[in-house]
Amino acid sequence: MQLINQYEPDVLRQSVVVFSQNYLPVSRINIKRAIALLVTGRAEPLELMSQQTWQVVSPRLVLQVPEHIRLTLTKSERFWRVPPVARREILRRDNHTCQYCGSTKKLTIDHVIPRSKGGLNTWENVVIACESCNQRKGNRTPQEANMTLRTKPKAPVHPTVAFAEQFWRSQQEINSG
Protein backbone atom coordinates (compact mmCIF):
# COMPACT_ATOMS: atom_id res chain seq x y z
CA MET A 1 0.00 0.00 0.00
CA GLN A 2 1.30 3.42 -0.93
CA LEU A 3 0.37 6.66 0.77
CA ILE A 4 -0.59 9.58 -1.47
CA ASN A 5 0.25 13.05 -0.27
CA GLN A 6 1.07 16.41 -1.79
CA TYR A 7 4.71 15.37 -2.30
CA GLU A 8 3.87 12.36 -4.50
CA PRO A 9 2.20 13.71 -7.65
CA ASP A 10 3.53 10.75 -9.68
CA VAL A 11 1.11 8.43 -7.88
CA LEU A 12 -1.75 10.54 -9.19
CA ARG A 13 -0.65 9.52 -12.68
CA GLN A 14 -1.19 5.82 -11.90
CA SER A 15 -4.01 4.05 -13.69
CA VAL A 16 -6.88 1.87 -12.55
CA VAL A 17 -8.70 -0.76 -14.62
CA VAL A 18 -12.48 -0.31 -14.69
CA PHE A 19 -14.76 -3.34 -14.98
CA SER A 20 -18.43 -3.26 -15.96
CA GLN A 21 -21.11 -4.65 -13.67
CA ASN A 22 -20.70 -8.06 -15.30
CA TYR A 23 -16.90 -8.00 -14.79
CA LEU A 24 -15.88 -7.13 -18.35
CA PRO A 25 -12.76 -4.91 -18.36
CA VAL A 26 -13.98 -1.68 -19.97
CA SER A 27 -11.16 0.84 -19.80
CA ARG A 28 -8.18 2.21 -17.94
CA ILE A 29 -8.59 5.53 -16.09
CA ASN A 30 -6.34 7.72 -13.98
CA ILE A 31 -6.43 7.45 -10.20
CA LYS A 32 -8.15 10.84 -9.81
CA ARG A 33 -11.13 9.62 -11.85
CA ALA A 34 -11.17 6.36 -9.87
CA ILE A 35 -11.32 8.33 -6.60
CA ALA A 36 -14.30 10.32 -7.91
CA LEU A 37 -16.13 7.11 -8.90
CA LEU A 38 -15.43 5.45 -5.55
CA VAL A 39 -16.40 8.49 -3.43
CA THR A 40 -19.66 9.04 -5.34
CA GLY A 41 -20.58 5.36 -5.04
CA ARG A 42 -20.60 4.77 -8.81
CA ALA A 43 -17.86 2.16 -8.43
CA GLU A 44 -16.68 -0.33 -5.84
CA PRO A 45 -13.25 -1.84 -5.20
CA LEU A 46 -12.54 -5.25 -6.70
CA GLU A 47 -10.53 -7.65 -4.59
CA LEU A 48 -8.18 -9.49 -6.93
CA MET A 49 -5.03 -11.42 -6.09
CA SER A 50 -1.71 -9.55 -6.08
CA GLN A 51 -3.40 -6.21 -6.44
CA GLN A 52 -1.78 -2.93 -5.57
CA THR A 53 -3.72 -0.35 -3.55
CA TRP A 54 -3.04 3.27 -2.84
CA GLN A 55 -4.21 5.02 0.32
CA VAL A 56 -5.60 8.50 -0.24
CA VAL A 57 -5.72 10.72 2.84
CA SER A 58 -7.77 13.91 2.94
CA PRO A 59 -8.96 16.01 5.91
CA ARG A 60 -12.32 14.17 5.97
CA LEU A 61 -11.62 10.82 4.38
CA VAL A 62 -9.13 7.98 4.16
CA LEU A 63 -9.76 5.96 1.00
CA GLN A 64 -8.17 2.77 -0.31
CA VAL A 65 -7.93 2.96 -4.11
CA PRO A 66 -7.35 -0.48 -5.64
CA GLU A 67 -5.80 -1.30 -9.00
CA HIS A 68 -9.20 -2.60 -10.22
CA ILE A 69 -12.69 -1.18 -9.65
CA ARG A 70 -16.16 -2.28 -10.76
CA LEU A 71 -18.93 0.06 -11.84
CA THR A 72 -22.07 -0.24 -9.71
CA LEU A 73 -24.55 1.66 -11.84
CA THR A 74 -26.03 0.15 -14.97
CA LYS A 75 -25.72 2.50 -17.87
CA SER A 76 -27.16 1.59 -21.21
CA GLU A 77 -24.29 1.05 -23.59
CA ARG A 78 -24.09 3.39 -26.50
CA PHE A 79 -24.73 1.68 -29.78
CA TRP A 80 -21.46 1.21 -31.61
CA ARG A 81 -21.30 0.77 -35.35
CA VAL A 82 -18.42 -0.45 -37.44
CA PRO A 83 -16.93 2.70 -38.99
CA PRO A 84 -17.30 3.16 -42.74
CA VAL A 85 -14.41 2.02 -44.90
CA ALA A 86 -12.20 5.10 -45.18
CA ARG A 87 -8.49 5.66 -45.74
CA ARG A 88 -7.91 6.97 -42.21
CA GLU A 89 -9.62 3.95 -40.64
CA ILE A 90 -7.79 1.47 -42.88
CA LEU A 91 -4.46 3.11 -42.00
CA ARG A 92 -5.32 2.84 -38.30
CA ARG A 93 -6.37 -0.80 -38.60
CA ASP A 94 -3.24 -1.77 -40.56
CA ASN A 95 -0.96 0.28 -38.28
CA HIS A 96 0.26 2.51 -41.15
CA THR A 97 2.15 -0.47 -42.58
CA CYS A 98 2.14 -2.19 -45.99
CA GLN A 99 0.39 -5.51 -45.55
CA TYR A 100 2.65 -7.18 -48.10
CA CYS A 101 6.22 -6.03 -47.29
CA GLY A 102 5.93 -4.05 -44.02
CA SER A 103 7.03 -0.70 -45.45
CA THR A 104 5.72 2.53 -43.93
CA LYS A 105 6.51 4.77 -46.94
CA LYS A 106 4.27 5.87 -49.84
CA LEU A 107 1.17 4.00 -48.66
CA THR A 108 -1.89 3.39 -50.84
CA ILE A 109 -5.12 1.41 -50.55
CA ASP A 110 -5.17 -1.97 -52.28
CA HIS A 111 -8.20 -4.12 -53.03
CA VAL A 112 -7.28 -7.74 -52.26
CA ILE A 113 -9.71 -8.93 -54.95
CA PRO A 114 -9.46 -6.17 -57.58
CA ARG A 115 -12.60 -4.16 -58.23
CA SER A 116 -12.38 -5.12 -61.91
CA LYS A 117 -12.83 -8.75 -60.82
CA GLY A 118 -15.84 -8.02 -58.62
CA GLY A 119 -14.02 -7.04 -55.43
CA LEU A 120 -16.02 -4.77 -53.16
CA ASN A 121 -14.96 -1.80 -51.07
CA THR A 122 -15.39 -3.68 -47.76
CA TRP A 123 -13.25 -4.10 -44.65
CA GLU A 124 -12.46 -7.69 -45.66
CA ASN A 125 -11.23 -6.64 -49.14
CA VAL A 126 -9.08 -3.53 -48.57
CA VAL A 127 -5.58 -3.29 -47.11
CA ILE A 128 -2.77 -0.76 -46.96
CA ALA A 129 0.01 -1.38 -49.49
CA CYS A 130 3.07 0.63 -50.47
CA GLU A 131 3.14 1.96 -54.03
CA SER A 132 5.65 -0.65 -55.22
CA CYS A 133 3.70 -3.62 -53.81
CA ASN A 134 0.44 -2.21 -55.17
CA GLN A 135 1.99 -1.83 -58.64
CA ARG A 136 3.60 -5.27 -58.48
CA LYS A 137 0.27 -6.87 -57.52
CA GLY A 138 -1.54 -4.87 -60.19
CA ASN A 139 -4.90 -6.16 -61.31
CA ARG A 140 -4.40 -9.61 -59.76
CA THR A 141 -5.24 -11.35 -56.51
CA PRO A 142 -2.38 -11.86 -54.02
CA GLN A 143 -2.26 -15.57 -54.97
CA GLU A 144 -1.99 -14.75 -58.69
CA ALA A 145 0.80 -12.25 -57.94
CA ASN A 146 2.52 -14.73 -55.60
CA MET A 147 2.26 -12.27 -52.68
CA THR A 148 1.07 -13.04 -49.16
CA LEU A 149 -0.77 -10.77 -46.76
CA ARG A 150 0.76 -10.28 -43.32
CA THR A 151 -2.67 -10.21 -41.67
CA LYS A 152 -6.13 -11.14 -42.84
CA PRO A 153 -8.17 -7.96 -43.35
CA LYS A 154 -11.22 -7.61 -41.08
CA ALA A 155 -13.53 -4.94 -39.73
CA PRO A 156 -12.48 -3.12 -36.53
CA VAL A 157 -13.91 -4.51 -33.30
CA HIS A 158 -15.76 -2.60 -30.58
CA PRO A 159 -13.23 -0.58 -28.52
CA THR A 160 -14.37 -2.27 -25.29
CA VAL A 161 -13.85 -5.72 -26.77
CA ALA A 162 -10.40 -4.71 -28.02
CA PHE A 163 -9.49 -3.37 -24.55
CA ALA A 164 -10.78 -6.54 -22.86
CA GLU A 165 -8.77 -8.79 -25.19
CA GLN A 166 -5.62 -6.75 -24.61
CA PHE A 167 -6.22 -6.69 -20.83
CA TRP A 168 -6.65 -10.47 -20.53
CA ARG A 169 -3.65 -11.09 -22.81
CA SER A 170 -1.47 -8.92 -20.55
CA GLN A 171 -2.81 -10.72 -17.44
CA GLN A 172 -1.84 -14.09 -18.95
CA GLU A 173 1.67 -12.79 -19.65
CA ILE A 174 1.97 -11.56 -16.05
CA ASN A 175 0.75 -14.88 -14.63
CA SER A 176 2.95 -17.02 -16.88
CA GLY A 177 6.10 -14.91 -16.45
Image (cartoon, rainbow, N blue to C red):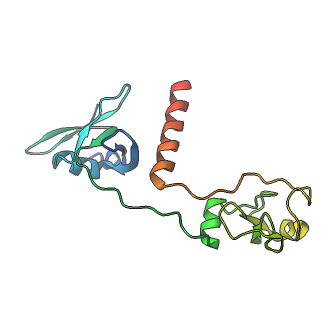
**What's the residue at 26%, 47% (across, down)?**
7
Q: Is residue 173 above or below residue 59?
A: above
Point out the residue furthest to the left here: 60
Residue 133 position within the rendered picture, expressed as x and y whole percent measured from the top left: 85, 65
Query: Which one is nearer the viewer's eye here, 151 or 175?
Result: 151
**What's the residue at 72%, 52% (across, down)?**
152
Is residue 2 found left or right of 89 in the rendered image?
left
Residue 131 position within the rendered picture, expressed as x and y whole percent measured from the top left: 82, 71
Is residue 83 found left or right of 25 in the rendered image?
right
Residue 126, image quadrant: bottom right
Residue 74 position within the rendered picture, expressed as x and y whole percent measured from the top left: 25, 49
**Residue 175 seen in this snapshot:** yes
Query: Which one is nearer the viewer's eye here, 128 or 65?
Result: 128
**Residue 4 seen in this snapshot:** no
Residue 46 position within the rendered picture, expressed as x and y whole percent measured from the top left: 29, 34
Report the quarter where the C terminus lies: top right
Is residue 176 found left or right of 73 in the rendered image?
right
**What's the residue at 44%, 51% (across, down)?**
160
